[in-house]
Amino acid sequence: MKPNVLTPPPPDAEARKAVRPVICYPVETLPRPDLDAYRALRDGLEPVARVIIPARDARCWSIPAGHFCRIHCHEGPQVGDLNLFNATNMAERLYTGKTRALNGTHVGRGDQLFSNLPFLRPMATITHDTLDWYGFDAFGAAVHDVIGTRCDPYTHNLLSDGGMYHQCCHSNLTRALADHTGLSLTEAEAHVHDVLNVFMCTGFTRDTGQYFMKASPVRPGDYLEFFAEIDLLACMSACPGGDCSSEHSSDAANCHPLAVEVLRPTGPPVGWAPLPVSGYDRSHGRG
């Protein structure tokens, strides 16, 4: 919440406010995936792995480059918090900030999920979304956001006068990553990063600019599908907020498991090859 205004507006206040916005990152020159080439493979996909993410818990799985992955609403409305890593170098991971800057606050079909600096390349391309009909509603909300961080025990502790809750998505991801990699909890926690909130319906209030959530429109049978542009290690938490209609970081919400499928196409998309990391020379002006 913003404090009450103390500074009187200057005479030209309305003129300053009326200045037209400028898009920070014009994307006309951004390389775009050939969705038709991906779509041509979807009818012949062979399932090669299936993972169930238990309610209020997390799991890891691998997605080889050139494979598809589908995150399914399995039993009931449920939100998932997704982390992505380069499977051979965990220093390269999903960068939601730049993904948001290049695609918008929420992602959908045709959007690409970018990795962090100094790598900055597409890690995955969203190829299908059964919730694409939702768009933006009257509240300014949409699904699959890259604006929220993830529910975590530190914020819960801060806002609950010292409460301890261990099924927050941050803790779920930390445990799952530690179990999968053999890292200690402390080592694994350092790798956990801001998430793609799969199926979550969110926005910002127009009067106070506060991040809000509302009941996800997802139902059993819905899924989000993406194509792995590089070898990926994925880690996802089935959020303790369930469909996030009321609260998160709580045992009170009705929660459900999520299902994940990894699918192998008959061959690579026409003209496809994994993209190299950023071509910037990293001299930072001192080359």
Image (tube, rainbow, N blue to C red):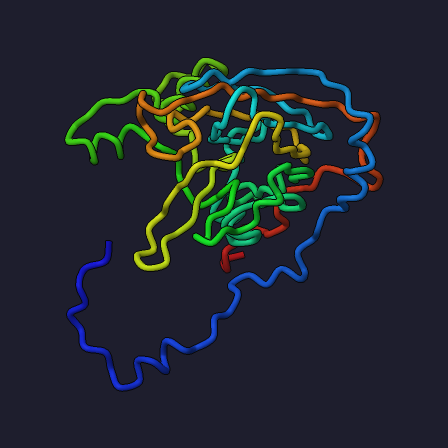
Quarter containing the C terminus:
bottom right
Which of 76/238 is in front?
A: 76
Q: Is residue 121 visible?
A: no
Left or right position of 72 against 167: right
Relative height, residue 68 to residue 24 (above, below): above
Residue at 50 percent of width and 69 percent of height: 22
Which of 153/182 is in front?
A: 153
Q: Quarter of the image holding residue 56? A: top left
Q: Quarter of the image holding residue 165? A: top left
Q: Is residue 86 visible?
A: yes
Residue at 47 percent of width and 30 percent of height: 79
Mark count: 0
Residue at 39 percent of width and 27 percent of height: 169
- Residue 117 placement (x, y as % from top left): 51, 45
Left or right position of 269 against 132: right
- Residue 28 placement (x, y as % from top left): 66, 62
Left or right position of 3 against 202: left
Which of 274/286 is in front?
A: 274
Residue at 83 percent of width and 36 percent of height: 40
- Residue 65 placement (x, y as % from top left): 70, 29
Which of 80/101 is in front?
A: 80
Relative height, residue 230 to residue 178 (above, below): below
- Residue 55 placement (x, y as % from top left): 44, 18
